Image: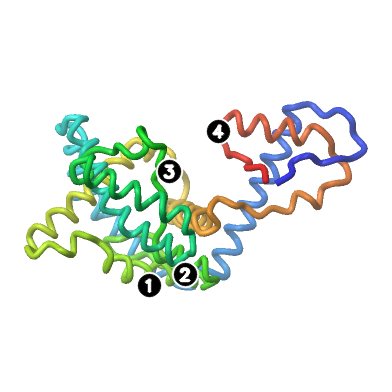
């Protein structure tokens, strides 16, 4: 994406450029929220009720368990468990790589899975990324449906599961078929491992809870929908900055540079 916008002004203060970008982002987010609430959340009353149930369950059970786990479990053990569950997830990733015709990524993810399963002792150690540069990717059947232009459908909050959409809910039902844990013959072992994965996932969120502000339901909904859109598009973000070609010069570039330096977002050049 080209970030150079040419116009009549030759000098614009960097801070001014950044402020204008922030203003545009805030307006864009506001309009997105209005559109989503009007068109993509027809079940909002039911969703809010389910969210209330999930939040109460989290406060009473999930967060205390995750907090205790985080406090008493040695860092070495936590890293091994995280690596193990990440390796389990890679099976699903490879399948959906192929379904999305991402053959190069599928080859890399297959290599990652094989290396971590064998050399990494069943996935307890991630050797593929540090030794061979094979990064972890995020793919699931919900994204695959999005790749093939299936609409997200209405936003839904699932009991125990949390934020989703109609498309992603259907994707969950397919992804479970490719979960290696299904190969375990003992239901108690399956339950223990699924519960363990849930605890590790919840513990990973403890440090970011301070970012939640305002209406908690809306916060989670917007964060989820934007994250899913980002994943479906493989990080490609559509914008309409070209509409502002007449009137701005280097200030916008400076603004983008400043926001990138602050870690607000990253602009990928084509």
**Label 3 Cα crowd, 10 Å radius (few <14 / some 14-19 / many 20+):** few
- Report the residue marked by disc 4: 263
In the depicted structure, whether residue 60 falls above or below residue 191? above
Looking at the picture, how far across and down is residue 71, in whole percent? 19, 32
Q: Is residue 47 left or right of residue 23?
A: left
Quarter of the image where one finds residue 121: top left
* Between marks 1 and 2 in the image, the one whose residue lies nearer the viewer: 2
**Distance (Cα) linking label 1 and label 2:** 9 Å
Task: Please name which of the two marks, 4 or 3, marks the residue nearer to the observer.
Answer: 4
Residue corresponding to mark 3: 212
Q: Nearer the viewer, residue 35 or 118?
A: 118
Please rate how many residues cluster around mark 1, counting C-alpha atoms within 10 Å: few if below 14, some from 14 to 19, many from 20: some
Distance (Cα) linking label 4 and label 3: 18 Å
Task: Give the mark nearest the N terminus, 2 or 3.
Answer: 2
Depth check: give the residue in front, 245 or 60: 245
Q: Which residue is labeled 2 in the image?
A: 145
Q: Marks 4 and 2, Cα distance to the nearest angstrom?
A: 30 Å
* Secondary structure type for disc 4: loop
Asked if labels 2 and 4 touch by Cβ distance under 8 angstroms, the answer is no
* x and y, in percent, of residue 217 in the image: 42, 56
Quarter of the image where one finds residue 160: bottom left
Residue 95 visible in this rendered orientation of the protein: yes
Looking at the rendered image, the disc whose residue lies closer to the viewer, 4 or 2, is: 2
Task: Name the residue carrying label 1.
Answer: 170
Work out whether mark 4 precedes mark 3 in sequence or the reverse, and give the earlier one: 3
């Amino acid at each position: 994406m080209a970030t150079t916008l040419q116009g009549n002004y030759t000098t614009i203060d960097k801070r001014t450029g950044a402020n204008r970008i922030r203003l545009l982002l805030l307006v864009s987010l506001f309009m997105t929220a209005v559109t989503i609430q009007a068109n993509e959340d027809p079940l909002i009353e039911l969703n809010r009720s389910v969210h209330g149930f999930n939040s109460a369950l989290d406060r009473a059970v999930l967060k205390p368990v995750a907090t205790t786990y985080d406090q008493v479990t040695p860092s070495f053990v936590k890293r091994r468990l995280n690596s193990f569950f990440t390796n389990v997830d890679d099976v699903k990733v490879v399948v959906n790589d192929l379904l999305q015709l991402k053959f190069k990524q599928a080859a890399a993810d297959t290599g990652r899975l094989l290396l971590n399963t064998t050399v990494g002792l069943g996935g307890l150690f991630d050797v593929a990324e540090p030794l061979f540069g094979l990064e972890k990717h995020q793919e699931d059947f919900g994204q695959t449906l999005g790749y093939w232009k299936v609409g997200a459908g209405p936003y839904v909050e699932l009991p125990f599961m949390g934020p989703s959409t109609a498309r992603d809910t259907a994707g969950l039902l397919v992804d479970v078929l490719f979960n290696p844990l299904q190969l375990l013959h003992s239901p108690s072992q399956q339950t223990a491992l699924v519960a363990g994965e849930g605890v590790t996932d919840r513990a990973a969120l403890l440090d970011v809870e301070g970012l939640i502000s305002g209406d908690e339901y809306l916060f989670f909904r917007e964060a989820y929908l934007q994250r899913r859109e980002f994943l479906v598009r493989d990080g490609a973000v559509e914008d309409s900055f070209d509409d502002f070609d007449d009137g701005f010069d280097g200030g916008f570039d400076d603004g983008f540079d400043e926001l990138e330096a602050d870690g607000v977002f990253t602009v990928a050049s084509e």
